[in-house]
Amino acid sequence: MNYILLYLSRPQSLLRMTLMHKSLIALMLAMSVNALSTAQLGFSHELGIITGPVAFQSDYGERYDFDTNKGNVGIGVGLIHYINFAYRADCDCYSRDTYWNDHFKIRSEIGYHVTTLNHLGPEAEKPSVGGLQLRSMQGKAKVFEAGAHIEWYPLSIRDFQSGYPKWAPYIGVGAHYVNYRPEATSSLGPLNNPVTTFRTFIDRIDTSQGSAIAIIGDLGVRYKVSPLSDILISSKWHYYVDDNYVDGLSPRNVNNRANDWIWWFNVGYIFYL
């Protein structure tokens, strides 16, 4: 938390915060505060940890190229917390049976992922100066995220919690505040000059610390392993709405105009408090 506060205290960082940033962060905080307040009235909590590979679709390599997609893969880890509306911790009993209580959960999450990035694909493989410049360049995306999701379970949460069925699929959407600190190096020497840097990336490299907002889509399933614990398998998509060099490269050049995004496959363990 001190890391985030120190960053937000920088004047140049505050100037980057758009109205959309502030609105989405306020919405996430409101969801979390409201959910936590409600939970104190008798609902229950769940805690968990997740980890798994992160496929980073960035301005490195050629978009939609198979070698790039399979090569730029990192690892992520996260802590998650749920508000469970179906069960009351104060009386050790089920809550009132409503559609909301039986089919929705509020999830808050903090996560950190790191991906080493390389220029892969046909352009980087060319026996030319440009190909050499691309092959010699390497980056690293180091990203911290924090936010809230709402998850919808088409099957009954009460039935799943009682042990039948054993599987509980869900769909989730949410938003994260993102803090990033990328790196970029070249074996040829310092970047941002015509000798070491591919022409379309000259003056388009920025490894400053920055912030963004990510929109989250999540498709997953839980498996009941005991009355008080589940295994979670999840496939998440994080789209960085205002891509301010999350990977250290600008998306505003002739070859790469799309915002960065990640696909995160993770496995986790959840414990009911």
Image: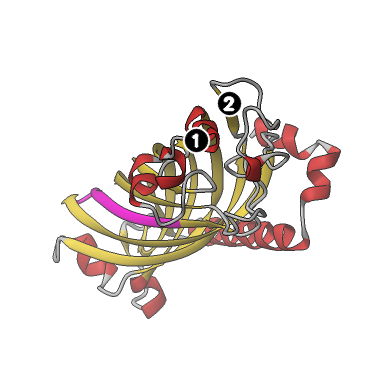
The range drawn in magenta is 227-237
Q: Which residue is mark 2?
A: 185
Q: Main secondary structure of the magenta part?
A: strand
- Sequence-first tag of 2 and 1: 1
User: In which quarter of the view is residue 50 placed?
Assistant: top left
> Pointer 1: what residue?
128
> Which secondary structure, mark 1?
loop
Neighbourhood count class around disc 2 (C-alpha, 10 Å): few under 14, some 14–19, many 20 upward: some
Residue 24: give x, y in percent of width and height.
Answer: 66, 61
At 32% from the left and 47% from the top, the residue drawn is 266
Viewer-side residue, 244 vs 75: 244
Task: Specify whether residue 272 is in view.
Answer: no
Quadrant of the image containing the N terminus:
top right
Which residue is pictured at 37% across the width and 48% down the height?
69
**Residue type for callout 1:** Ser
Image position, residue 190 (x, y; %): 66, 22
